[in-house]
Image (cartoon, rainbow, N blue to C red):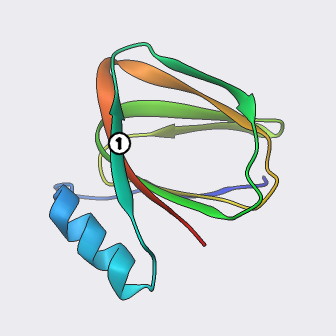
Amino acid sequence: MDFVVDRHQGPPPSEGEIIARMRADGLAPHGWGNAPDDTYGWHEHHYEKVLYCVSGRIVFHTDTGDADLGPGDRLVLPPHTRHAATVGAEGVRCVEASR
């Protein structure tokens, strides 16, 4: 796999808790959301992407497999990892930062 997924156990943290955790790790997070069934086409970034799913679901597609994220799950995509995404039927809210 060219990405890392950390699965959250138990009640998911709030968006504020996730932002505080990311800031404590030296990151500058920002939140975003998408409507149900939205998609992102294939692309890549020159930086490492650190992303938490706050609510809803989203699937990130990569050349080596898919990462299905739900509330509290964390995804780390290395620089230059080609990816696309599909938002779940209930929409999604995420917080992400570059590293």
Can you say which quadrant of the picture contains the C terminus?
bottom right
Residue identifier under label 1: 32
The residue nearer to you, when weighing 62 against 23, is 23
| Percent x, y of residue 76 | 60, 60
| Percent x, y of residue 75 | 54, 55
- Is 16 placed left or right of 31 in the picture? left
Question: Residue at position x 70%, y 55% from top?
Answer: 3
Please determine whether, in this image, residue 85 is positioned above or below residue 37. below
* Mark 1: amino acid: Trp
Would you say residue 87 is visible in this rendering? Answer: yes
- Is 80 placed left or right of 71 in the picture? right
Please determine whether, in this image, residue 79 is positioned above or below residue 1. below
Quadrant in the rendering for residue 57: top left
Question: Residue at position x 36%, y 41% from top?
Answer: 70
Quadrant in the rendering for residue 55: top left
* Few, some or many residues within 10 Å of mark 1 (<14, 14–19, 20+): few
